[in-house]
DNA sequence: TGATCAATCAGTCTGGAGGCGGAGGCAGAA
DNA sequence: TTCTGCCTCCGCCTCCAGACTGATTGATCA
């Protein structure tokens, strides 16, 4: 009997998963949790074989919970189940020690199969996620802004707010000539032709001063 | 017997909802769909009393589907069920004619209650969403871009891509002078001082050409 | 019919943006 | 020590952006 815990802040997702597993012989749901903290407590108490874990939850995310659980209970196999295959959190999740990675679009047989394989020590990575990983490893996923210097980053964040060179000069306490130099370097490093494109780039790549990022 | 259709691109959410409703007498799930287009076809064929509709789906979003359904079948009550209460899509959904608005954190009794109330003509708006609406109505929350003309919108979307006036001129088949006029009007209507700020505004307010929006 | 507004285009003018070349100070690596 | 990279700053020059003023056409509406 494979003992499974279900972690998701959306009750209807939990019920969906549980209904997937209800008819399956050999799998037993031993508990559910609606946050990362609850998940840690539940797992350490019940010590299930498998945890089905949502990545994005309102109270503490699944990555921290994954890390926390594996620290105290390394034998546990954690299957991440999330909504979006292109989420940036994919890689931190893998790094945190997640065993398998599935999408919420998965159907019952896929979930059951993933659980059974996990219990036999075989991971399942959803194909889109796997492709993303492959492409990242292939290209080493070097983002154009990776080789911006620290100061150029500061300037780019100002550009991303729509500030003019003069405003940036005042903000960073440097001369306007210096700002222009940085801007030129930024444009060339990002491969864009003016500050507007740089601002768009920054906003679409999360290079922003301090705004909440929702997932 | 209340006839219900379930629309969500995540099968486990659909199964979760259906498992909520399975034991409930007086409610019958007459079908499920995994995209907006499918939903429209399903609803027009089966004509359910209630549709439980996810807002964010990979193939066509729930808002368009809601609008489409109500155009041909105005008697249908559409209950939006989504993950995030602070999503900007809340208001378009209400405008599109969504009847009730719930979160995926809702439990079985809340879902059942919402369906029964909807069938009696009584909407249910989740409290966080309601609060957001209240605050928006209080502040009247009229977005600056609400009084852009259609053409100005086209130009703004180009600016949001980082295009120059010349490029916009080529893209929209209008003179560069015309582009400049539009740009000036846009800047003044948005209350910003240059195209970079306009681009930032557009990107942060989802005024973008055709990019997938994840949520 | 006259008024209004969106969309188009024109001319003129100013200022900022950005390219190009050059340079000094400074810290860490070879 | 020399070299390299980053941060800082300077001058010069060109060009686009955007403001301002004004005009025409066509659709809608009172």
Image (spheres, coloured by chain):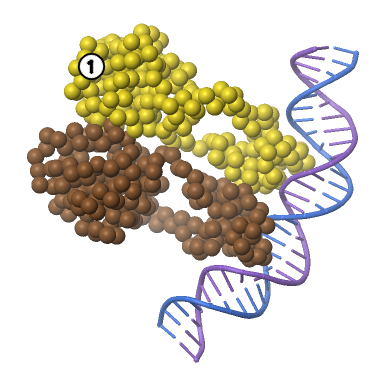
Chain colours: A yellow, B brown, C purple, D blue
The residue under the point 46% across, 25% down is A130
Query: Residue at horizontal 27%, vertical 59%?
Result: B72
At 29% across and 51% down in the image, what residue appears? Answer: B40
Q: Is residue A76 visible?
A: no
Which of the 4 image quarters holds residue B152?
bottom right
Instruction: Say few, some or many: other residues with alpha carbon within 10 Å of mark 1 (under 14 / 14 to 19 / 20 or more).
Output: some
Question: Percent from the top left, x then y, of residue A112?
Answer: 28, 21
Left or right of B182, for residue D13:
right
Q: Is residue A88 left or right of residue B168?
A: left
Q: Nearer the viewer, residue B61 or A162?
A: B61
Quadrant (top left/top right/bottom left/bottom right) for the C terminus of chain B: top left
Measuring from the top left, give residue A12's x and y in whole percent: 25, 33
Q: Chain of mark 1?
A: A
Left or right: A49 in relation to A130:
left
Is residue B215 depicted above or below A20 in this figure?
below
- In the displayed structure, D22 sits above or below B214; it is below
Picture quadrant where residue B21 is located: top left
Residue B95 vertical position relative to residue B4 in the rendered view, above or below? below
The picture places residue B6, in percent across and down from the top left corner, at: 24, 42
> Which one is in front, B43 or A19?
B43
Residue B186 lies, in percent from the top left, at 57, 60
Read off the residue under disc 1: A27
Classify B57 as above or below A120.
below
Which residue: 32% across, 55% down? Answer: B68
Number of callouts in the render? 1
Q: From where the camera sits, is residue B61 visible?
A: yes
Q: Is residue B41 left or right of residue B135?
A: left
Q: Secondary structure at mark 1?
A: strand
């Amino acid at each position: 009997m494979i003992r499974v815990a279900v972690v998701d802040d959306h009750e209807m997702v939990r019920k969906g998963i549980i209904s997937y597993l209800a008819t399956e012989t050999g799998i037993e749901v031993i508990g559910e949790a609606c946050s990362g903290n609850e998940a840690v407590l539940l797992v350490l108490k019940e010590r299930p074989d498998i945890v089905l874990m949502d990545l994005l939850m309102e109270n503490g995310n699944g990555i921290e919970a994954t890390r926390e659980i594996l620290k105290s209970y390394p034998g546990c196999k954690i299957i991440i189940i999330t909504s979006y295959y292109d989420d940036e959190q994919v890689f931190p999740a893998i790094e945190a020690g997640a065993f398998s990675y599935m999408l919420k679009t998965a159907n019952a047989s896929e979930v059951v199969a993933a659980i059974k394989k996990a219990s036999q020590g075989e991971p399942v990575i959803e194909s889109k996620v796997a492709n993303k990983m492959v492409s990242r490893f292939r290209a080493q996923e070097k983002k154009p802004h990776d080789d911006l210097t620290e100061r150029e980053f500061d300037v780019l964040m100002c550009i991303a707010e729509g500030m003019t060179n003069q405003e940036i000069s005042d903000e960073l306490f440097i001369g306007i000539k210096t700002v222009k130099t940085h801007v030129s370097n930024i444009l060339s490093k990002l491969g864009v032709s003016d500050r507007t494109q740089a601002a768009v780039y920054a906003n679409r790549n999360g290079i922003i001063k301090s705004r909440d990022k929702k997932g």
